[in-house]
Image: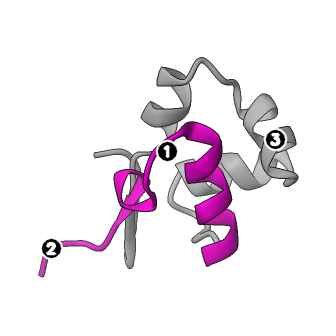
Amino acid sequence: MGKHHEKLLNNLETARKSAGLTQQQLSELAEVSRKSINAIENGVYVPSTVLALKIAEILGCRVEDLFRLPTR
């Protein structure tokens, strides 16, 4: 799995690279800053539900493919 936040694990960087997109390209498609995409990938920022859904749609996957809760 990708980078970790204490409340959310993500696989965004791997999925983005598999889609052949740079952080800048994904940010433009998602209508957010490149810094936002970078912060999400590095586990610094937890995206809103709307942004998570938008990113999943752009990458052609489910939100659950990108983000998951840590195992208890």
Quick check: 39 left or right of 32?
left
Image vertical order of residue 53 relative to residue 61, above or below: below
Q: What stretch is highlighted in magenta?
A: 49-72
Query: In terms of image quadrants, where is residue 50?
Result: bottom right
Name the N-terminal-most of marks 2 and 3.
3
Distance of mark 2 from mark 3, alpha carbons?
31 Å
Q: Is residue 28 visible?
A: yes
Magenta run includes residue 70: yes
The residue furthest left is: 72
The residue drawn where x is 53% and y is 51% is: 42
| Numbered disc 2: secondary structure | loop
Circle 1 crowding by C-alpha within 10 Å: few under 14, some 14–19, many from 20: many
- Mark seen at residue 34: none
Residue 29's disc is 3
Along the line of sight, which residue is nearer the eye, 35 or 25? Answer: 25
Mark 2 and mark 1: Cα distance apart in space: 18 Å
* Residue 10 rendering spot, x and y as whole percentages: 41, 55
Q: Is residue 54 in the magenta section? A: yes
Quadrant assignment for the C terminus:
bottom left
Main SS class of the magenta portion in the image: helix
Identify residue for label 1: 12
Depth check, mark 3 against mark 1: the one in front is: 3
Name the secondary structure under disc 3.
helix
Instruction: Give the residue type at disc 2.
Output: Thr
**Which residue is at a point 57% across and 71% down the rendered structure image?**
46
The type of residue carrying mark 1 is: Leu
Q: Name the residue under label 2.
A: 71
Q: What residue type is labelled 3?
A: Leu
User: Which badge, 3 or 1, comes first in the chain's sequence?
Assistant: 1
- Mark 2 vs mark 3, foreground winner is 3
Disc 3 from disc 1: Cα separation:
15 Å
Q: In which quarter of the image is residue 20?
A: top right
